[in-house]
Image: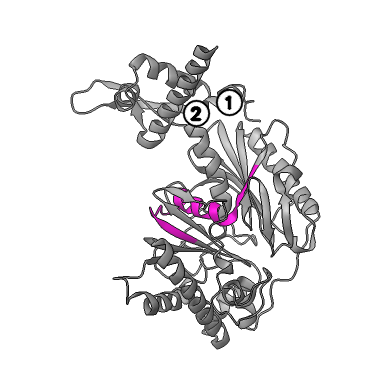
Amino acid sequence: MTQAVRHDSMRARNLGLVLSEVRRSGPVTRAALAEITGLTKTTVSKMVGDLIEAGMVTETGTLRDGERGRPGTAVSLSGERVAALGLEINVDYLSACVVDLTLTVRLRYTQAVDNRVASPVETLARLQKLIHRAVDEARSAGLVIAGSTLAVPGPVNGGLLHSAPNLGWHDVRVGDLLVPDGGLPGVEVENEANLAALGELWFGTGHGDFLHVSGEIGIGAGLVVGGALFRGARGLAGELGHVVVSPDGPACRCGSRGCLEQYAGQEALLRAAGLPAPAPRTAPDATAPDLTASGLTVSDGATPDGATPDGAAPDGAAAISGAPVAPGAPVAPGGVAELVARLRDGDGPALEACARAGRALGIALTSATHLLDPGTIVLGGVFAPLFPWISGPVRDAMTERLTAMRHAVPEITVSRLGADAATLGAAGQVIHRVIADPGLHLAAARTAPAPR
């Protein structure tokens, strides 16, 4: 029995080793895989055969290994069978995406809804309908959903959402309220800011060691070090929105005063600019989500094509590191879209609101920089469309406070993913686990129904 367990463990390790190397080096021949992994050619050939049968790997023509090597049949990852479901609950929307093994986005839905006026049970019932639709469409394309991760706007530990004050949720076991969809594994729950950082790592520009700041109604941050997410002792790292930037400032939903969120959160920004927050929106079900997009390849670091959360398709390129957002770049729905329009027109209150928010954000990021020393700071969420107006005040506030002790302020860049980062990171987390341990998914992938 012990010997059988050891054999199974060794086989699982070798499958993960081979598939990980195909992802990293593909297209690559079996002979090259044997040389790179140290496994025998016979073992590699058997492993590759199993992965091809499961639809995780595909043959892609001949390839010569080096100048003198004999041509061999090359293999690469295949996106035709195995996929992952990424989900997000935020204050004013629900979203879902399906990403295949090659990190190609196969479909994406976002439903605008004010989740502050609904209980956790009601919100998760709506999300469940969105899940059903996404899973049904994925299965009709011949895809097997290997797993799913849900992003939520608050700290999570062991599946327990401790507090999401902007939703009014406290100590909610979110995963327990979702019923797995026919054969779909249970949903893993993770903090939205953490997943947004992973989304930027895997689908964005991949900055190495960086701090990703998610600006929505709340503000969160995710720290990536050496290609891995830093979670803290209890998974609660990254609550940047509740860093105090003014001890005598306005009261915050968390019970403190002067938190960053009260100066640079979406609602605070809109108030300061003299704009109303987006009107509460409700949607009784997910039968007609606000957007559908399919066949979107974003694994090369490009901004996903498709539509923004309000259903408006972008008509221009997204900004890259430090550059102004292009006129057609995605913007957040409702009030933030109006704020961007006023900023482009040079509206005084709008410009001052962004300057004030940027200064507060710069103060908070100064503390984060002293503690964490990130190489790059990536501004995402609603900060992405506001980047041309908010990044300067952020940089100025940090320069004023850091240069006495440091040679330079960290590079400050804009996210390529905007509001999609957390949902993509949620799906990407599943894909990376499948690649590391594909053995758990071989049987299901082999028996996947043909596309309808």
- Where does the image place residue 316, in percent across and percent down from the top left? 48, 63
Q: Position of residue 402 (x, y in %)?
A: 37, 74
The image shows a total of numbered marks equal to 2
Q: Residue at x 38, y 32 (%)?
A: 21
Q: Which residue is mark 2?
A: 56
Instruction: Check the picture and name the quadrant holding the C terminus.
Output: top right
- Give the vertical position of 112 relative to 356 (above or below): above
Please name whichever residue, 121 or 273, is drawn nearer the observer in this view of the structure.
121
Give the residue type at disc 1.
Ala
Mark 2, other Cα within 10 Å: few <14 / some 14–19 / many ≥20: many
> Which quadrant of the view contains residue 146?
top right
Amino acid type shown at disc 2: Met
Q: Residue furthest bottom?
A: 348
Tell me what residue is drawn at x 75 percent, y 50 percent.
124
Q: Quadrant of the N terminus?
A: top right
Provide the residue span drawn in magenta: 188-212
User: Of helix, strand and loop, which one carries label 2?
Assistant: loop
Per the image, label 1 sits on a secondary structure element best described as helix
**Left or right of 91 on screen, residue 69:** left
Q: Is residue 107 magenta?
A: no
Q: Which residue is mark 1?
A: 445
Q: Is residue 189 magenta?
A: yes
Residue 182 seen by the camera: yes
